[in-house]
Amino acid sequence: MNKLIGISGSINYECEGIYPQNFISTAYTDSVLTAGAAPIIIPICHDDNAIKKIVSSLDGIILSGGPDIHPSLFDEEPHKNIGSIVNARDILDFKIIKYAFEMKKPILGICRGLQVINVFFGGNLYQDIHSQTKSEIQHQQKARGDLATHSINIKADSFLHNIFGDKTLINSFHHQSIKDIANSFEAIATSINDNIVEAIEYKENHFIVGLQWHPEMLAEKNSQMQEIFNSFVKVVENN
């Protein structure tokens, strides 16, 4: 276990006491540990030098799920159905991506992580799938997170195809999604029937993959979902 995987933390402003709390779901850290690497939580931090030093010490980055991204970051005003926004999280994630990209660190984005990757590199989002598209699929499932609920098609010769083949079932906890994909990225998975982008991959010589679902919630009971983290750690080891 000699590789360090940084996981972007989130912040809780509704805790008891005076100070906000940095936190991350244990499902992320468990999945990284099972894959044979050591997880490090990257806290909300406003010091550029500190963030750069943290990223430089890591071997790979996981951008975790969380609140909606501020629409000003893709030149839009807030839609009436937008959810909670945390500016500190947007700033942190942008800085993590910037430094990780400059340092050629492999990046795996999960849910919000996919969306923030797309926005950072110049793409945009549907701020609310169900009022801005014709989708009839429930992308905010009411079932438990460890239950996969809808299907996706997977592009051949992609990171995901090596794990799942042409199709798989995923869980779904998002009301935003990619509208226009950033330059140098391609969709490698889309949901069946409505073609919502469910995964993207960077086309140049740098490993950046984003997933719209939460494989960490499924990984304990689903070996293929755990294989996402296993394969990511192998990429990190070979980087």
Image: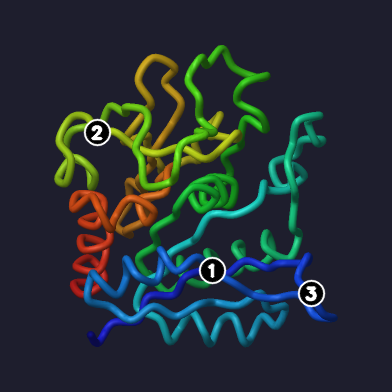
Instruction: Please determine whether, in this image, residue 38 is positioned above or below residue 60.
Output: below
* Comes first in the chain, label 1 or label 3: 3
Label 2 CA crowd tier, 10 Å (few <14, some 14–19, many 20+): some
Secondary structure at numbered mark 1:
loop
Question: Between marks 2 and 3, how big is the CA–CA gap?
Answer: 41 Å
- Residue with the mark numbered 3: 16
Image coordinates of residue 155 in percent, x first then y, are: 24, 32
Q: Residue at x 19, y 68 (%)?
A: 234
Amino acid marked by disc 3? Glu
Label 1 CA crowd tier, 10 Å (few <14, some 14–19, many 20+): some
Question: Between marks 2 and 1, how big is the CA–CA gap?
Answer: 26 Å
Image coordinates of residue 84 in percent, x first then y, are: 75, 48
- Residue with the mark numbered 1: 24
Q: Residue at x 37, y 34 (%)?
A: 187
Toward which corner of the image does residue 129 lie, by quadrant? Answer: top right
* Comes first in the chain, label 2 or label 1: 1
Secondary structure at numbered mark 3:
loop
